Image: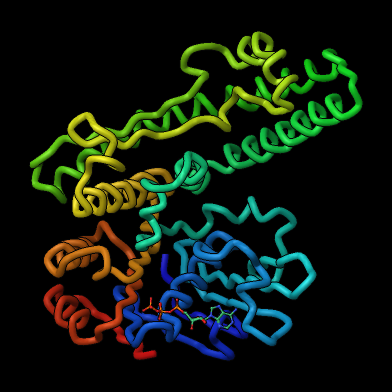
Amino acid sequence: MLLNKLSLLNYKNFETETFSFDPKINCFVGHNGVGKTNVLDAIYHLSFGKSYFNPITSQNIKHGEDFFVVEGEYEKETGSEKILVSAKRGQKKIIKRNAKAYEKFSEHIGFLPLVIISPSDRDLITEGSDTRRKFIDGVISQGDSKYLHTLLNYNKVLAQRNSLLKYFAANNTHNQDTVDIYNEQLHQYGTEIFNKRNQFLEDFTPIFLNRYRAISSGSETVSLAYSSQLKEKDLLLLLQENALKDKLSQYTNFGIHKDDLSFEIDEHPIKKFGSQGQQKSYLIALKLAQFDFIKQQSKVNPILLLDDIFDKLDEQRVEQIINLVHDENFGQLFISDTHADRTENVIKKVGQSYKMFKL
Ligand SMILES: Nc1ncnc2c1ncn2[C@@H]1O[C@H](COP(=O)(O)OP(=O)(O)OP(=O)(O)O)[C@@H](O)[C@H]1O
């Protein structure tokens, strides 16, 4: 899969801009704030229908403008594809594939597999469990559209159940039969998601450990574990047994919305005990494993975006990663960096075709 051409109109700091890409390596270089990350984000937008960095659509429209359009021309094994994402202030975003609008954005997820490695990945270690659940969901969804659909259903029922609990508390009333209907639905969707997450971790962990070993030369042991209340008990039982707790807290205390991943190094949480370098290596191993996993599932090389790589990696490690595209294993690579010379020196060594874009 290749992205041949990208056109931007009023996207963040770009008014109108068109880029024609190299099939292997593309580098965006320039001073801070010129829009290097924004170009990568536009490419991300075409795969996921949203920004990786700023989920508020209106803030992705250029200041003072009314709308943005991002358009990409791809070459897939099945033929060429034109994907367009557009947003107008106050209106619903539109995603079109070959001029036909998607009814549901979820149908588009996984069509253009993509992995991004960015300094903001550190949120996976530092932020709450929500960020880690999003990571798991993102990886699974790219290869399993039914999973995303089930997850959306689960979240809808969960929101309804929470509103109902609040409504009962506000009106000093309670109807367990209605709660039970939601319990059944949460149980059905939640168990399906739990099973898929569990299976995913089983498949993904060895891939991740392999990647970490390769990056760190095996000097420390790391682990990745999935924690879920559903490992202890069936969700329906948990919901029934904790009915009073939910009633008092006006909130659903049990379910897959409480799942988390634990990241450990030598059996201690990496957040507290990992050095900065170890944390970086852990995150890169996670992302490269994501790449391997999606590739295994979709049988295509995902597009790889490396944002601000030298912020995250030393020169040797960048070279090591860029070398990966030398193999047939990797597909098209997009890189952003502040120093043109530094990036070009590393890329030249790889001996692949490349294109530099000075912004
Ligand atoms: N909606 C918007 N309208 C206009 N400009 C915007 C909008 N959103 C972001 N920007 C501008 O985009 C620029 C940041 O772009 P970006 O993050 O791509 O920079 P960068 O080249 O990657 O910089 P760095 O090297 O510091 O990472 C800032 O100048 C910011 O003001």
Q: Nearer the viewer, residue 276 or 103?
A: 276
Q: Is residue 332 visible?
A: no
Q: Above or below — where is 113 with respect to 206?
A: below
Q: Position of residue 91 (x, y in %)?
A: 79, 69
Residue occupying the point 64% across, 71% down: 85
Question: Residue 189 lies in what quarter of the image?
Answer: top right
The residue lying toward the viewer, choosing from 46 and 24, is 46
* Rendered-image quadrant of the N terminus: bottom left
Tell me the quarter of the picture where residue 296 sits.
top left
> Which color scheme is applied?
rainbow
**Where 25 sits versus 233, above or below?**
below
Q: How many marks?
A: 0
Q: Position of residue 126 (x, y in %)?
A: 39, 48
Q: Position of residue 302 (x, y in %)?
A: 39, 58
Q: Residue at x 12, y 66 (%)?
A: 316
Q: Is residue 351 left or right of residue 17?
A: left
Would you say 280 lies left or right of 70 here? left
Q: Is residue 4 visible?
A: yes
User: Horizontally, is 13 left or right of 249 in the view?
Assistant: left
In the picture, the quarter occupied by the C terminus is: bottom left
Q: Nearer the viewer, residue 178 or 353?
A: 178
Residue at point 16% right, 35% down? 221
Pinpoint residue 23: horizontal percent, then vertical percent. 34, 75
| Horizontal side, residue 282 vs residue 244: left or right | left
